[in-house]
Amino acid sequence: MSLPLAAGTWGVDPVHSTVQFSIRHLGISSIRGRFTDVDASLTVGDDLAASSVSATIGMGSIDTGNADRDGHVTSSDIFDAQANPKMTFVSTSISAEADGTYTATGDMTMHGVTRSETLAVTFFGTEDNPLDGSVRAGFLATGSIDRTHYGIDWNVPLSAGGFMLSNDVAISIDAQLVGPSA
């Protein structure tokens, strides 16, 4: 099976794409944020086995809406963005599911640790951009990672039990890709 896209390399449009996350705080609410430094590409081959996706995220580009929190998250307590400036994902396989969605499994590297992760992917189709004539494709990839698997284990115990931050981090990537030039 192949992707319903023209063969070649599709690059991310960073202006029309977002990489977001959510983590439980104090067990009673979620903190949401996004990364603004994102680069990604999808190489479409003759079939899914010959197709691949790769992405790089600048860890220092986190934006949670609170500068003090962003500074703490990029510090050596959590991301250590100075020593580990990038997070990467390189697919090892892309597969089609019976419901018309896809899964992308690949090597995620963050905080100096590489682990296999799987993202659920929904394809929203293609559209010609009337402003520049380019072909665009839309995807939503979602998943969850355990931050402690990447050595990110800073936390504060709560008086009632539990910890300030959950280990699970929900990820949502809403990507608009620009098709290969003809």
Image: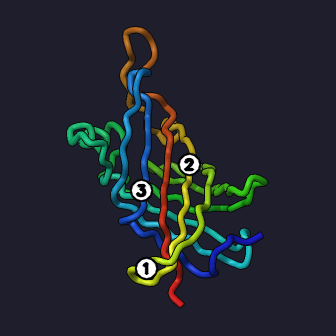
Tell me what residue is drawn at x 68 percent, y 70 percent.
Answer: 3
Q: Could you tell which of marks 2 and 3 lies nearer the N-terminus?
A: 3
* Residue marked by disc 1: 130
In the depicted view, which residue is nearer to us: 165 or 46? 46
In the depicted view, which residue is nearer to us: 21 or 125? 125
Q: Could you tell which of marks 3 and 1 lies nearer the N-terminus?
A: 3
Where's residue 112, x and y in %? Answer: 46, 50
For residue 154, above or below residue 118: above
Q: CA distance from mark 1 to mark 2?
A: 29 Å
In the depicted view, which residue is nearer to us: 148 or 67? 67
- What's the amino acid at mark 1? Pro
Q: What number is the disc on residue 18? A: 3
From the image, which quarter does the C terminus lie in? bottom right
Helix, strand or loop at label 2? It is: strand
* Residue marked by disc 2: 142
Dot 2 crowding, Cα within 10 Å, few <14, some 14–19, many 20+:
some
Q: CA distance from mark 2 to mark 3?
A: 12 Å
Total numbered circles:
3
Q: CA distance from mark 3 to mark 1?
A: 22 Å
Q: Are marks 1 and 2 in contact (CB under 8 Å)?
A: no
Helix, strand or loop at label 1? It is: loop
Tell me what residue is drawn at x 66 percent, y 62 percent.
Answer: 92
